[in-house]
Amino acid sequence: MDYDLILIRYGELALKSTKIRLRFERKLVKNISASIDGNIKRDQGRIFLEPKNFEDALEKLDKIFGIVSYSPVVRTKTTKEDVTKTLTEYTKHLISEGLLKEGMTFAIRCRRVGNHDFTSQEAGAFCGSVVIDTIPLKVNLSDPDFEIFVEIRDNDTYIYHEKIDGPGGLPLGTQGKVVVLMSSGIDSPVAAYLMMKRGCAVTALNFDNSPYTTSDARNNFNDLVDQLQTYASGVPIQKRVAPYGEYLKTCKNKGPEKMTCVLCKSGMYKTAEKLAKEIGALAIVDGSSVGQVASQTLQNILSSRYGVDMPILSPLIGMDKLETTRIADKIGTFEISKRDDGGCKAVPKYPETQADLNRVIKAQEDISQEEELEKVFKNIEKED
């Protein structure tokens, strides 16, 4: 069976006001067009794609946020003769593929948009009779073995049987920009993915901690961004790398040894805030999960974020490592993140887990944090 089109559905967009929905629809169409070559049409709550490469389109739609589901469809005219001919051919195709067999139960799911001289129920009954004339099946509307969908939209009718799940969420780029603190680990790429799913354009900010880390950490970061780019149709991820080794050296030499990780994270947030303001981002994102590591106890989260006025979003905050790993595996970042990059040699043997805010403020003053971070910010690299 040669499919003519792909019918694309969206979910949350339909709940928006007319003005917002139209804006989101246009953005979704633009994002689809950025990675798939073909003709696209919007039609009363549906998007129809006529791709030049059908298989390639099906693969790419699975990674475009805002799409709830999609279906390969055949199109015909809304006349009894055309529907009968096309649905008969479609039924024979299903039989040849082994999807329909004698003795099975089936249901026609009919949806109608526009003005017609028949009801959806009447259209469904007619289509059901066409199928039964082709193969003897029993109708079961409550729990059928197989479903055939018929969408009648004015003068065109669309027939299909598959509903393939999309990634859902909101169209990328509809919710503004965020700066994501992204390392080479498991958590932060997943945090970036989840914010992209909510429509946020991402600038990935990596902190190069050499000589306390190896070049493998930066290479893995680049590979992680490349993998996430496959989900960034229409709104590519921007990369920034901050030289952070000298700042860490100052933390270790002038600050309390146990507080190195807290001062490190504090500096990251403040650097990210400067970058966010420069590029017009509205929030900072990290991969924190309560209690997962020393820097992520509630006390340390409070202390490390002190002095940052911009919202800091942590989409993994209530997840455990297993939940995060499952998402990482699903989106293709886990195998990259689990590569051995040598870790960070700046981590103290006994890191602070309950940092007192007043002591953190004093330590920030002792290391001249603002001056040191200004050097970091001025030397941030923009990568292609």
Image (spheres, rainbow, N blue to C red):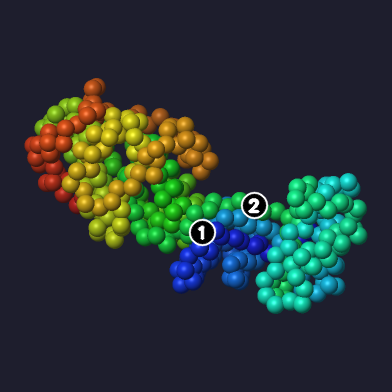
Q: Say if residue 28 shows up in the picture.
A: no
Drawn side of residue 21 relative to residue 84, left or right? left
Closest to the observer, 373 or 355: 355
Q: Could you tell me which residue is drawn at 55 percent across and 58 percent down? A: 11
Give yes or no for contact between labels 2 and 1 (Cβ–Cβ under 8 Å).
Answer: no
What SS does tag 1 mark?
Answer: helix
Q: Residues within 10 Å of mark 1 (few under 14, many from 20)?
A: some
Hey, which quadrant is residue 151 in on the image? bottom right
Comparing labels 2 and 1, the label whose residue is closer to the camera: 1
Q: Say if residue 311 shows up in the picture.
A: yes
Which comes sooner in the sequence, label 2 or label 1? 1
Residue type, numbered disc 1: Glu
Estimate the x, y position of residue 369 in percent, counting from the top left.
Answer: 13, 42
Drawn side of residue 324 relative to residue 122, left or right? left
The residue indicated by pointer 2 is 164
Q: Residues within 10 Å of mark 2 (few under 14, many from 20)?
A: some
For residue 122, above or below residue 191: below
The residue indicated by pointer 1 is 12
What SS does tag 2 mark?
Answer: strand
Spatial separation of the CA atoms under disc 2 and disc 1: 17 Å
Pick the quarter of the image with the C terminus: bottom left
Estimate the x, y position of residue 15 in percent, counting from the top left.
Answer: 50, 63
Closest to the observer, 382 or 173: 173
Estimate the x, y position of residue 210 in percent, counting from the top left.
Answer: 26, 36
Estimate the x, y position of residue 26 in percent, counting from the top left.
Answer: 50, 69
Q: Could you tell me which residue is drawn at 24 percent across and 58 percent down? A: 277
For residue 164, above or below residue 337: below
Drawn side of residue 149 relative to residue 259, left or right? right
Residue type, numbered disc 2: Ile
Q: Could you tell me which residue is drawn at 67 percent across and 75 percent down? A: 114
